[in-house]
């Protein structure tokens, strides 16, 4: 078992504060790559959050705690699980949901946490939080300063349309700088991984996120139809 000397991302942010965009970019790309691998293996994590992202000695992300995972081939899940602050609105509304889609939403919350060291939605009142999510009430504080490109990426993930995260201008522009800055701290094996990550600007997996996230939005808009679908599945 690998030792992750730098603990989890949540504790790291608590100590370091909001991360610089270059660091957030590098970690988010690693999370995207990990999520792609899991989903390609038909594994949906369903509890992605900063506490479940460990950091090794080189501050590379390692996804952990698969206690809530489910077979990714499942079209709709009916189980409420995960952490409310990171959960997609369809889960909080107790609607049948695509487990892979819920991972995508959680990924957006993680990115916000890295950049602002706080959550995008106040989870002290779940009903109010769902309302904020559905109305796309995402607060972007002036401090720390975050680029408009990074904000746009968060807004797209926590909204109705998700385009290829690795093709977003913010990630592409920062990618070379991220790899260069880390070059002196990585091993040969890590360098090969970093080089691989720079080429992931377009991938069918991420292009498919557009369809997945829109599926979730349609489920929210047609909750009555979803409940009928849920009942039919139970009867079967």
Image (tube, helix red, strand yellow):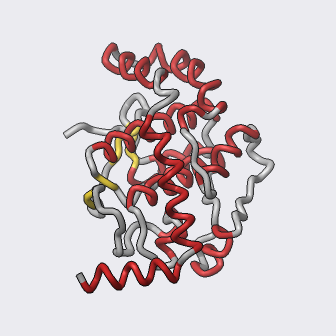
Number of marks in picture: 0
At a point 57% along the width and 18% down the height, the residue shown is: 176
Between 229 and 66, which is closer to the camera in this rendering? Answer: 229
Q: What residue is at 37 percent from the left and 22 percent from the top?
A: 193
Residue 48 drawn above or below residue 94:
above
Which image quarter is the N terminus in?
top left
Residue at the limit of the structure toward the right, as seen here: 142
Q: Quadrant of residue 121?
A: bottom right
Residue 121 located left or right of residue 79 = right
On screen, residue 93 above or below 165? below
Locate the C terminus and report the quarter of the image it occupies.
Answer: bottom left
Residue 27 is situated, as x and y percent measured from the top left of the image, at 49, 36
Out of 192 and 144, give the one closest to the viewer. Answer: 192
Where does the image place residue 131, in percent across and percent down from the top left? 66, 75
Residue that appears at 31% across and 45% down? 38
| Residue 232 position (above or below residue 62) | below
Q: Residue at x 36, y 17 (%)?
A: 192
Position of residue 199 in the picture relative to residue 3 (left or right): right
Q: Position of residue 64 (x, y in %)?
A: 31, 50
Q: Position of residue 68 (x, y in %)?
A: 30, 63
């Amino acid at each position: 078992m690998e030792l992750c000397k730098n603990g989890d991302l949540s504790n790291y942010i608590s100590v370091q504060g909001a991360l610089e965009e270059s660091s957030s970019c590098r970690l988010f790309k690693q999370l995207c790559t990990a999520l792609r691998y899991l989903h390609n293996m038909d594994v949906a994590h369903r509890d992605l959050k900063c506490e479940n992202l460990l950091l090794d000695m080189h501050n590379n992300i390692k996804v952990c705690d698969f206690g809530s995972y489910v077979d990714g081939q499942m079209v709709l899940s009916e189980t409420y699980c995960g952490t409310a602050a990171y959960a997609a609105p369809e889960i909080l509304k107790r609607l049948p949901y695509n487990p892979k889609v819920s991972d995508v939403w959680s990924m957006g919350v993680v990115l916000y946490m890295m950049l602002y060291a706080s959550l995008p939605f106040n989870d002290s009142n779940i009903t109010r939080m769902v309302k904020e999510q559905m109305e796309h009430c995402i607060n972007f504080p002036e401090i720390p300063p975050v680029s408009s490109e990074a904000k746009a990426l968060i807004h797209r993930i926590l909204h109705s349309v998700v385009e290829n995260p690795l093709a977003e201008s913010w990630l592409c522009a920062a990618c070379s700088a991220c790899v260069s800055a880390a070059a002196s701290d990585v091993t040969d094996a890590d360098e090969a991984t970093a080089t691989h990550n720079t080429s992931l600007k377009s991938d069918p997996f991420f292009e498919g996120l557009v369809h997945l996230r829109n599926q979730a939005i349609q489920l929210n808009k047609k909750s009555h139809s979803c409940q009928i679908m849920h009942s039919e599945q139970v009867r079967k």
